[in-house]
Image (spheres, rainbow, N blue to C red):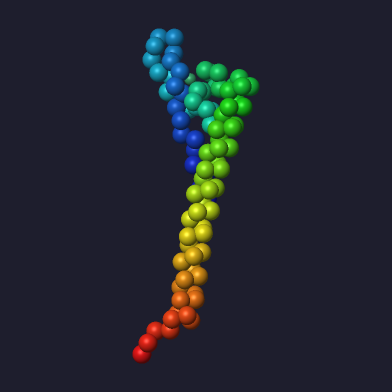
Amino acid sequence: MARRPWGERCTAHRTDGTPCGAWAIRGGYVCRMHGGSAPQVKAAARRRLWEEWERRQEARWARMKESTRDEWARMFLPMIDPPQG
Ligand SMILES: [Zn+2]
């Protein structure tokens, strides 16, 4: 599985009102400068990453089951129902 970056930008604003735009910490929505290093923010980010990971695992399992079923069908259908002629 390819490791995709979290890819979120910091949603906080600078003191002059412009968006920060720096890369957020993995699993979070703020950069290190805007609270991303605070323990509770890191904990929430970890939980979010974990949930995200679980979601992807589920999607992966679903795909796997489907391809396995197709494989089985390819392997056994000819035996059950041999082509005529
Ligand atoms: Zn920031």
* Of the pair 78 and 46, the residue shown nearer to us: 78
Taking 61 as reference, is 69 above or below it?
Answer: below
Q: Is residue 85 left or right of residue 2?
A: left
Taking 63 as reference, is 11 above or below it?
Answer: above
Counting from the top left corner in percent of width and height, residue 79 is at 48, 81
* Of the pair 30 and 47, the residue shown nearer to us: 47
Q: Residue at x 63, y 22 (%)?
A: 39
- Decide if residue 39 is in sight here: yes
Q: Residue furthest right?
A: 39
Q: Residue at x 53, y 48 (%)?
A: 58
Q: Residue at x 47, y 80 (%)?
A: 80
Counting from the top left corner in percent of width and height, residue 42 is at 60, 26
* Of the pair 5 and 41, the residue shown nearer to us: 41
**Could you tell me which quadrant the C terminus lies in?**
bottom left
Give residue 14's quadrant in the image. top left
Counting from the top left corner in percent of width and height, residue 68 is at 51, 64
Q: Residue furthest left?
A: 85
Counting from the top left corner in percent of width and height, residue 40 is at 61, 22
- Decide if residue 26 is in sight here: no
Q: Residue at x 51, y 59 (%)?
A: 65
Q: Is residue 51 left or right of residue 8?
A: right
Q: Residue furthest top?
A: 16
- Number of marks in the image? 0
